Image (cartoon, rainbow, N blue to C red):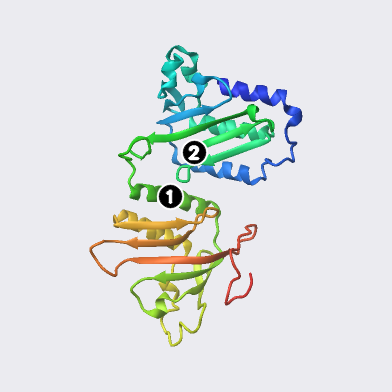
Amino acid sequence: MISFVSLLLCFVSSVWADETYGRDGRYGRSSNEYSQYSTARQQWEMFGFSSYSMEFSWDLSCCRCKVAKKKLVVVNDTVGQVTCLSSSCTTYNCSNSSDLDVDNYDSIDGLFNLIENAFDNNYSQISVSYDSILGFPKSAKLGATKKSNDTIGWSISCINIPSVYNTCNDSFLINSTSAAYIKYVVAKTLWTSKSIKNYRMKFKWSCFCTSCYVAQKAIVVTNDTISNVTCTNTTFCSGCTDGLQVSYYKTITGLFEMIASAFQQGYAQISVVYNSRLGYPTSGYLDKSLMIADEEISWSIDCLTVLNKGINWKTCKFFPFGTS
C-alpha cells in the first residue's frame, strides 16, 4: 500500500523535476552518500530484525498532527499500531485524525525505500544520519529541489528491539557486552564481504610480555596466512631471537577469532575499534578478569595496505618495505 509520504514524494518530484540534478548530479550511485546508504542498509538487513517499536516523528512543513512524535509498533516489517506521544496530539485532537492511520507511516525498511527513491529521482538534497551499530536511518532530509519547503524528513529518537537493543528508557536493556558483540558482527561481516586475503600492516601487541614480542612489526599476509614478520625499528629488536616467529602474530581473521573467543568465554572487558570502511579491528583491549593482573592483552594496527587486485586501500607508506 502506498503511504501518504510516498505520494507526497512522487508529487514533489514530478512538479519540480526541472530543478533537480541530472543523472550525473551530486547524488548518483557513485556518490559517497549512496555508498553510506548502501552500507547502512546492508548492515540493518544483516540482522534481520522485523519486529520492533520506535519513537518516530515526520519532519514536514505541514500537518501538525502528522509531525507530532508517535510510537510505532512494527510487526513483520509492517507498521501495525500508531500511538501519539506528544501533548500536541491532545491540543489538536489528533486522536481522531487520519494522521494516526498506520498507512501514513513506514517501517525501517520503508524508510530505506524512501531514501532509495530519492536517489533514483535525483533529489537535490539527500542528508541522512545512520545508527552506527544497527544502520537504520535515525534522521533524514530529502528534497526534490533546493527549496526548504519541498523537503521531507524524519527522526527516530529511540528504538526498542525486544531483548536485543533498547534506547527508549533509562534501563537500556542492551548492555555494553551486547553492544560490543553487535559491532563485532557488523565489522566481521564487512571485512569478510571484501574477500581480502593479501595485505600488509604495521602491528603491535601490548601486554605483560618481552620487549621483543611487543615491538611494532611489519607483517605481510599472503592468502590469509602470515608470510613475513619484520621489525619496523631494528633498535627495539636488537638481539631478539624469537620475537619474529609468525606463530606469535595474528592475521585479521585471527584477530576476529580471538575477539569471538573472548565473547564466548565471557571476558570482563572487550573494547575494540573497527575501521569503518573495511571492518578490520584497528585496535583492541581484552581483559578476561578484572581481579587478575597482567593477563590482559591489546593491539594496534597503525596502517594497513590491501594488496588484492581491484581494492584500493592504503593508509600509510609501508616500511621497511617501502612505499606500496
The answer to whether 119 appears left or right of 85 in the picture is right
Residue at 63% in and 59% down: 312
Q: Quadrant of the N terminus?
A: top right
Residue at 66% in and 45% down: 31
Q: Is residue 277 above or below residue 55?
A: below
Residue 180 x/y as whole percent: 38, 51
The answer to whether 272 appears left or right of 305 in the picture is left
Q: Name the residue under label 1.
A: 183
Residue 2 showing in the rendered view: no
Mark 2 residue type: Phe
Residue 284 x/y as whole percent: 41, 61
Which of the marked residues, 1 or 2, is nearer the chain's N terminus?
2
Residue at 47% in and 52% down: 187
Marks 1 and 2, Cα distance to the nearest angstrom? 14 Å
Toward the viewer: 233 or 78? 233
Q: Is residue 20 above or below residue 204?
A: above
Callout 1 secondary element: helix
Mark 1 residue type: Lys
Q: Quadrant of the C terminus?
A: bottom right
